[in-house]
Amino acid sequence: MIFSVGAARACLFVLFGSLALTCAAQTVPPAKWETSKLDNGTRYLSYHSTAPQLGKPTPFIVNFFCSPFSTKTEKGMLGIEIYVDNVAALKPFKFDDFDGPDAATNGKKLLRITVNRPGKPAFVADTMLSGWTPGPKNFAFGTSEESQRAKSTEKTVLQALADDAESLQLTITDPRNAKLKLEFTVPVTDKRSEFKSLLAGLK
């Protein structure tokens, strides 16, 4: 990834920290959406919620991002990121296997993306994902592709969310035990216009 990943992740870590503080004050905070934009033009649409993971109430953020333009030195990217809080409570899921550029999960399609659309078959794709540790209690997963590439799973998913989707489900499978899964559901029916704005400028 060539665009400003460090700046983006620093910004998102601040957002994630605010979620953790909210969760400390409330048992189950209400789900909410936020939009943001980085100095380099990358746009974010973020869904904050809490859902059971492995039987434990778990705060999470799903970030949808798009930088529609590329330069001679930087490639615009688009994709999806998932920030998970309080990962110590989610053992035995092997977060460490996803961590870093030399992760044991490299080359494995452990993320299933399901886009549910009214009156149409669900769009389902399995893809690879990267992982990193934004803080001592958190973990993040992500999948991305160059925004100007004509076709990619990430672009297809984001365009479907802007078009006619009603919900998105993201399922991450443990690399050592296929029965262990993290599942995140995002309702998007009333956010189609925001997804259109997120993708504005794409070819």
Image (cartoon, helix red, strand yellow):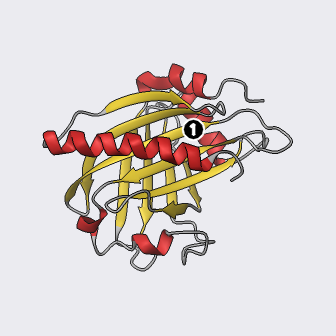
Q: What amino acid is at disc 1?
A: Phe
In this orientation, which residue lies closer to the viewer: 107 or 125? 107
Q: Residue at x 20, y 37 (%)?
A: 29
Residue at the limit of the structure toward the right, as seen here? 72
Q: Residue 141 placed where, x, y %?
A: 48, 57
Q: Residue 98 placed where, x, y %?
A: 49, 69
Q: Residue 28 placed where, x, y %?
A: 17, 41
Q: Which residue is mark 1?
A: 65
Query: In which quadrant is the C terminus drawn?
Result: top right
In this orientation, which residue lies closer to the viewer: 130 or 178? 130
Q: Residue at x 56, y 61 (%)?
A: 129
* Left or right, residue 194 beside residue 77: left
Q: Residue at x 57, y 44 (%)?
A: 7
Q: Is residue 23 above or below residue 179?
A: above
Disc 1 packing (10 Å; few <14; some 14–19; many ≥20)? many
Q: Secondary structure at mark 1?
A: strand
Tally of marks: 1
Q: Is residue 24 above or below residue 40?
A: below
Q: Is residue 107 visible?
A: yes
* Left or right, residue 192 beside residue 75: left
Q: Residue at x 53, y 33 (%)?
A: 44
Q: Quadrant of residue 168?
A: top left
Q: Is residue 114 visible?
A: no
